[in-house]
Image: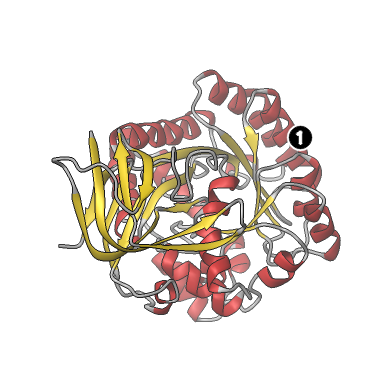
Amino acid sequence: MDFRIYNIKSILSWDPILDKLVCKDDKEIFISNGIIKNIDNKVNQTSNDIDAQNLVLTPGFIDSHTHPIFIGNRANELAMRVSGKSYEQIARQGGGILSSISDLRNSSIENLYKISEFNVCNVYKNGTTTLEAKSGYGLTVDDEIKSLEVIKLLNEKLQIEIISTFLGAHAIPPEFEGKKDEYVDLICDEMIPAVAEQQLAEFCDVFCEKGYFSYDQSLKILETAKKYGIMPRLHADEFVDSNGAKLAADVSALSADHLMAISDDGISALKKSDVIATLLPGTTFFLGKRNYANGRKLIDSGIEVALATDFNPGSCTINSLPMIMQLAVLHCGLTIEEAFKGVTWNAAKSLNRHLNNGVIKNEYNADFILWDIESLDEIPYWFGNDRIVSVYKNGLQIYSRS
């Protein structure tokens, strides 16, 4: 279908060539079959034209780190944290990631799909048009496959793009307590080959962290994934410096995520690589911690920074990238323009989608948001308030607040 969007107040988008935010006023957009074909003062009129009602238009947001495939919730852990227990203490007492395993293992794929669909559909209204989704709450061959099959079904049936990441190395399952290397062997010898054979994941992630997977164990998993054509990304340096950032550089990962405890050596390693540093300030906020990732230092070191929600049942139930933008501006040292770049262009690069997504540009996907705002500053300013009027994916409206 061909159509134009007219009466746009302004188009706000990152310009990868100029490496800055650009604002285009009095422009119209012509879209054909879900692709932007022309941006000009006047474009071809069609019978399907959309009146933007003098609203601001931006690219659709890209959430590059989420865990939406789960059953139930862990609200009790919030009460435990309020009483003074840390995330690490809760995990040692059987909470954390392990507490989500049993429910998922006992769930049918139909029920898991139904609940995960609810989780994913809630992001539409916040402007997310592309979503990375991880497995990681099954931790057996069958249950990781089940989780990835749900992600595949969601991508096929829903209107947003959902990118699949295998995260069998999310934690050590109870049956492998004290046998961590054996579980790593299971991941490498059985899980990754099965995932690759069924083409269920584009990426492989690892929780490289003290008490979870070491540098050497994570390296083995990610190098195995690369041999099967699955690209690496990883949880890195969240609680302590685990050499995760260095590992990300060593394996040419697309993204190293969290980085609250990254060392100067880790920053140096990222600086020499093409790895995107993805910050997840919603997790720090939700866990009541104060050690936000130092985005200012990363950017000033020449490292590209993306932002994501880390939506999950235990350590961050925030699914709004506008809220994440505000947290990054207030606590991570980013400017508003840098935060905007982090949820559009840099997020697209972290998912290898930068050739067709993340900006408003000819020959790019017609993924965009219409906002009731006057300037970019208002996106993080209206914390938790709805200024999004409508959201479009590949030229199709997927959300309207009316």
Residue 193 x/y as whole percent:
61, 22
Q: Quadrant of the N terminus?
A: top left
Residue 184 x/y as whole percent:
70, 35
Is 216 displayed left or right of 55 in the figure?
right
Is 92 displayed left or right of 75 in the figure?
right
- Mark 1 highlights which residue? 220
- Nearer-the-camera pick, 246 or 361: 361
Residue 200 x/y as whole percent:
49, 28
Q: Which residue shows up at 59% across the image and 46% down it?
A: 349
What's the residue type where badge 1 is placed?
Lys
Q: Which residue shows up at 61% across the image and 72% down it?
A: 334
Is 45 displayed left or right of 88 in the figure?
left
**Residue 64 visible:** yes
Q: Quarter-wise, where is residue 233 in the image?
A: top right
Q: Residue furthest front?
A: 42
- Nearer-the-camera pick, 297 or 210: 297
Q: Quarter-wise, where is residue 159 in the image?
A: top left
